[in-house]
Amino acid sequence: MTTPLIETRNVGKNFGALRASHDINFQLEAGARHALIGPNGAGKTTFINLLTGVLAPSTGQVLFKGTDITNVAQAERVKLGIARTFQINRLFRGLTVLENVYMAISERVGAAPFMLRPAGKRRDVIDESIELLETLKLADYAHLRVSELPYGRQRLVELAITLGLKPEVLLLDEPAAGVPSAESHIILDAVAALPKSIGVLIIDHDMDLVFRFAQYITVLVRGAIFAQGTPKEIGANADVRAVYLGQATHG
Amino acid sequence: MSAPTSAHEHPAARALAGRHRIRLWEIIPWLLAIAFYFAFPRYLGFGTELLVTILFAISLDLALGYAGIVTLGHAAFFGAGAYTAGMLAFHHIWSEPITGLIAAAVVAGAVGLGSGLVLLRTTGLTLLMLTLCTMALLEEAANLGGHYTGGFDGLPGIDIPPLFGMFEFNPLYPRVQYLYVLGVLFVCFVFVRTLVYSPFGQSLTGIRENTLRMHAVGAPVRVRLIVCYTISAAIAGVAGALWAQSNAYVNLSTLGLDRAATVLIILVLGGYGRLYGAFVGAVAYMALSHFLSKYFPTAWQLGLGLLLVVIALFARNGILGIFETLQRRIGIKRPSP
């Protein structure tokens, strides 16, 4: 068996007496299209925060390609190739779309620490930014400030910044949340067009999206893994339907 | 279609690639400064003070306007620089002015580095209070260390040898001081301008705009902030040393809250994060206080207060922000500075 890209062993996180997550054994393989679902408050975002190093786990280990990264800081994990999008946009709102993407690429290629050369002279970074924006059909908006864009496009900028980091592990926290349904296909197309080699973990409430996208689904309930399996297995799982899918259909 | 050539031609790419180019109007402040020298020979003392204040405000703009480090204690570095240059010269250890500036920059930068390592772990109100504390500690140290610092009375009559061994500093006709300060201001400004348009400067803006996202793109946020704070402190130290050298004395006012608050007001007035906000704000503030205090000696601060209220309510981006809004209204496209 190949080493998974990212793996957790008995990971748990307590906030005081609250067990936000516990005993999570999770693996994401290269090329995987994995979905994480669960009711509100199941600890999905907490789990993403544990993977990216925003939170330190109370118990257990996080491994990247077999190496323990439990104590590796967030910025270092990004350099290793673990990148995420946020459930709520976290953008440089006062800057242009191009500058937003430039920021990520400039960090990745190591241009950012340089002080005495203008940012505009890093043509390589600018060119790569524009090309990335073209693939996401954002090039026409490159000169606009992010705050001037409609929310759906801002969501795409969120994705663009993350893709600029060329991650090996991509964690998408509700990428289509808040996007009008008429525009959500742009996000879905972009996700579908991601390079095959990277491992993608997507969190979403939208079951259509999850079942279309994922080859494998993990269901999280009250901070622990409740069930895992292919979309078919999860769809047929009576327990999952009871706690989650059932709720959804009954409203 | 997506060949690099087409990427170059993209208007946004061209704007970013040409952002750092010097625009024609940027020569205006320097022409005005030179014109001032010839037009108002009797006001050169005021002019020197103004230039020093501009440099101090630029140093604050780097930390506050670009990196978003909220500080109310920037006079700590101004004072550290002023006392370094002043004490070295007063005690006849080292009095050559230009190397004095370098010593001041090193000491102020070290104070910035040392305090930055501790305080840049915090943000917001805590950070504000800690910067204030740092300044208060230094002020009290200068007050108590009377043997070296002159204590409450400061160090009067510092003897500065002629610049380059030729140009004498004359306290009554500060022509040499004015040109000296103008030259140093220019050098420091060119450095800061280069810095803010560099990828490093861009990343500082990113930290200001969204710190959490900067962590998530893998930027070593705290290191960047500490480096920025240190550079800013060093420049503030140069401003302080210029003040000490051109006035030929140092006192506790260089370390006071009054000075720290004034420079903050100047930056807010002119527009922070804008490079030239320091110029506009310093000229507006100092000219206003000069004339207001002349004509309304008892209530001149009321006028400044009112102006500040108006700026805070209606023009968050300061005087330069007003111009930018006007420009946008009449439809002249200019990439954001």
Image (cartoon, grey):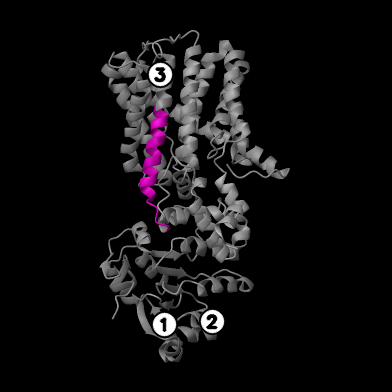
Specify the label residue B244 is tagged with: 3
User: Image quadrant of residue B74?
Assistant: top left
The type of residue carrying mark 2 is Asp
In this view of the protein, which residue sits in the foreground, A214 or A224? A214
Q: Give the range drawn in magenta.
A: B217-237
**Circle 3 residues within 10 Å: few <14, some 14–19, many ≥20:** many
In this view of the protein, which residue sits in the foreground, B200 or A41? B200
Chain letter, disc 1 residue: A
Q: Quadrant of the N terminus of chain B?
A: bottom right
Chain letter, disc 3 residue: B
Q: Residue at x 64, y 73 (%)?
A: A182
- Indicate the secondary structure of the residue bearing disc 1: strand
The number of callouts visible is 3
* Residue under disc 2 on the same chain as residue under disc 1: yes
Q: In this view, does B46 lie above or below A26?
A: above
Q: Is residue B246 above or below residue B240?
A: above
Specify the label residue A163 is tagged with: none
Q: Decide if residue B30 is on the left or right side of residue A122.
A: right
Residue for badge 1: A216
Residue for badge 2: A208
**Residue B163 at what x, y percent from top left?**
41, 14
Q: In this view, does A31 lie above or below B209?
A: below
Disc 3 + disc 1, Cβ < 8 Å: no
Q: Which residue is drawn at 39% across and 39% down?
A: B229
Q: In this view, does B110 lie above or below A209?
A: above
- Indicate the secondary structure of the residue bearing disc 2: helix
Secondary structure mostly seen in the magenta stretch = helix
In this view of the protein, which residue sits in the foreground, A119 or B226? A119
Q: Decide if residue B243 is on the left or right side of residue A208.
A: left
The type of residue carrying mark 1 is Tyr
